[in-house]
């Protein structure tokens, strides 16, 4: 009889512990450029498990509520945070790392083309979909043969809500990637002649919005935009 009493309690405790432990996925981005940062070490200081971000700034690591997580990368300030119950409710988290203050060097011109950007963007999206799955449609075909029916499961599912939040975060990061591609240091330097920290500060102060860049597709548009910003900041 004693064993019959202990077993259910043991199973309950085990299930409770398992419910608080899971693999969490996330992104690591630069606090200044807002670009993904690769090769960042994400270490669970409790379990000693270590994960590293891929070239898209993505990582996955097994954690439990209350674990202490270390984030470290060359050239960035390292810090620790506690994986709280609030973070546990999210399937995807965003980690922002701050560069160590150094003297910026002159920009090196690259040959990164729009074709390269499209290829990388497609790879990032495919990898994200493969890991997170597609978002289910809110409206399903009505089996009664009349119009469309609303899927209650898709509307209220916790998993779908978390997935939508992850997609929203992913879209934000993709927009930042597009902004950095279109309004890049090489282009701005070629129009302004600015270099180093002065160039970096000018870009941060004048960076156009994603919406503006999508509606202004030519280099000429950006040239006139930069020209107007130069008159504003260097009257």
Image: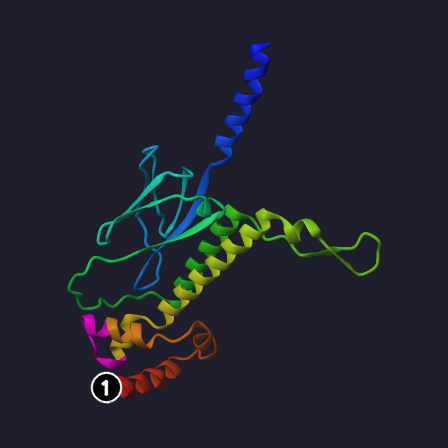
Foreground residue among 232 and 118: 232
Q: Provide residue 198's location: percent of width, then percent of height.
A: 20, 74
**Quarter of image, res 226:** bottom left
| Type of secondary structure dominating the magenta stretch | helix
Instruction: For mark 1, give the secondary structure.
Output: loop
Q: Magenta includes 193? A: yes
Q: Residue at x 25, y 78 (%)?
A: 190
Count of marks overlaid on the render: 1
Q: Residue at x 29, y 87 (%)?
A: 232
Q: Residue at x 50, y 59 (%)?
A: 168
Q: Residue at x 84, y 56 (%)?
A: 145
Foreground residue among 38 and 154: 154
Left or right of residue 12: residue 24: left
Left or right of residue 152: residue 53: left
**Quarter of image, res 202:** bottom left
**Quarter of image, res 109:** bottom left
Q: Magenta includes 166? A: no
Q: Provide residue 235's location: percent of width, then percent of height.
A: 24, 90
| Residue 187 seen anywhere in this rendered image of the structure | no
**10 Å neighbourhood of mark 1: few (<14), some, or many (≥20)?**
few
User: What is the magenta range?
Assistant: 191-199
């Amino acid at each position: 009889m004693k064993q019959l009493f202990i077993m259910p309690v043991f199973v309950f405790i085990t299930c409770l512990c398992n419910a608080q432990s899971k693999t969490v996925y996330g992104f690591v981005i630069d606090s200044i450029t807002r670009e993904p940062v690769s090769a960042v070490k994400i270490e669970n200081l409790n379990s000693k498990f270590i994960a590293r971000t891929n070239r898209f700034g993505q990582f996955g690591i097994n954690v439990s509520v209350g674990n202490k997580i270390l984030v470290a990368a060359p050239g960035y300030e390292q810090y620790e945070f506690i994986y709280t119950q609030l973070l546990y409710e999210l399937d995807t988290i965003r980690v922002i790392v701050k560069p160590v203050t150094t003297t910026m060097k002159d920009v090196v011109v690259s040959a990164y083309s729009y074709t390269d950007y499209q290829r990388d963007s497609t790879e990032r999206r495919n990898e994200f979909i493969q890991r997170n799955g597609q978002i289910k449609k809110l409206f399903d075909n009505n089996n009664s043969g009349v119009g469309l029916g609303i899927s209650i499961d898709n509307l209220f599912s916790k998993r779908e809500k978390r997935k939508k939040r992850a997609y929203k975060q992913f879209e934000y990061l993709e927009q930042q990637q597009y902004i950095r591609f279109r309004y890049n240091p090489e282009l701005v330097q070629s129009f302004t002649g600015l270099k180093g920290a002065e160039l970096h500060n000018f870009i941060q102060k004048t960076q156009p919005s994603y919406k503006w860049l999508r509606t202004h597709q030519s280099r000429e548009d950006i040239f006139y935009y930069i020209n107007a910003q130069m008159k504003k900041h260097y009257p």
